Image (cartoon, rainbow, N blue to C red):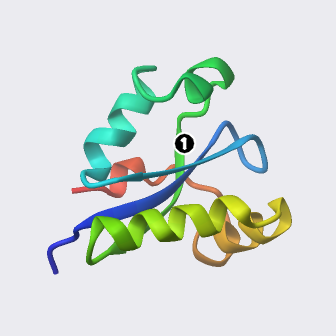
Amino acid sequence: MVHGGWTYIMASKPHGLLYIGVTNHLAARVDQHRRDEGSAFCRRYGIRMLVFAEAHETIQAAIWREKALKAWNRAWKIRLIEELNPEWRDLYDTLA
């Protein structure tokens, strides 16, 4: 499946600060965050761990999902992360 977009969540540490983003090239975008070339928020608070990623067929679908996730309360976001990544592993190394 060719992905049109990704919704992703990054964290400063397990249960730390969270950042929700959207991109059409996940590996490159996460690499930017890890090199402090991503968002100013991530740079300021040391948010470098990819803890959740979700592929979408279109970038528009990814944007809609990003907006929905940003509206969720923190407990829901943590539950979503822990359903797929209970150990809060950095998923960056799993990206192809």
What x and y, as percent, mark residue 56? 33, 75
Quarter-of-image position of residue 54: bottom left
Question: From what the image shows, is residue 18 above or below residue 61?
Answer: above
Neighbourhood count class around disc 1 (C-alpha, 10 Å): few under 14, some 14–19, many 20 upward: many
Position in image of residue 32 (x %, y %) = 35, 30
Up-down relation of residue 82 to residue 27 (above or below)? below
Q: Name the quarter where the C terminus is drawn.
A: bottom left
Direction from residue 47 to residue 34 in the image, left or right:
left
Q: For the N terminus, give its image quadrant.
A: bottom left
Viewer-side residue, 85 vs 54 = 54
Question: As rendered, which of 14 and 68 lies closer to the eye?
Answer: 68
Asked if residue 51 is positioned above or below residue 84 in the image, the reply reads: above
Residue 50 in picture, x, y percent from top left: 50, 49
Image quadrant where residue 51 sits = bottom right
- Residue at left offset 29%, top offset 55%: 95
Q: Which one is in front, 20 or 47?
A: 20
> Residue placed farthest to the left in the image?
2
Instruction: Identify the residue position indicated by label 1 in the image.
Output: 49
- Inspect the image, locate mark 1, and give the three-letter code of the amino acid beneath it: Met
36 vs 72, nearest the viewer: 72
40 to the left or right of 82? left
Q: Position of residue 86 (x, y in %)?
A: 67, 69
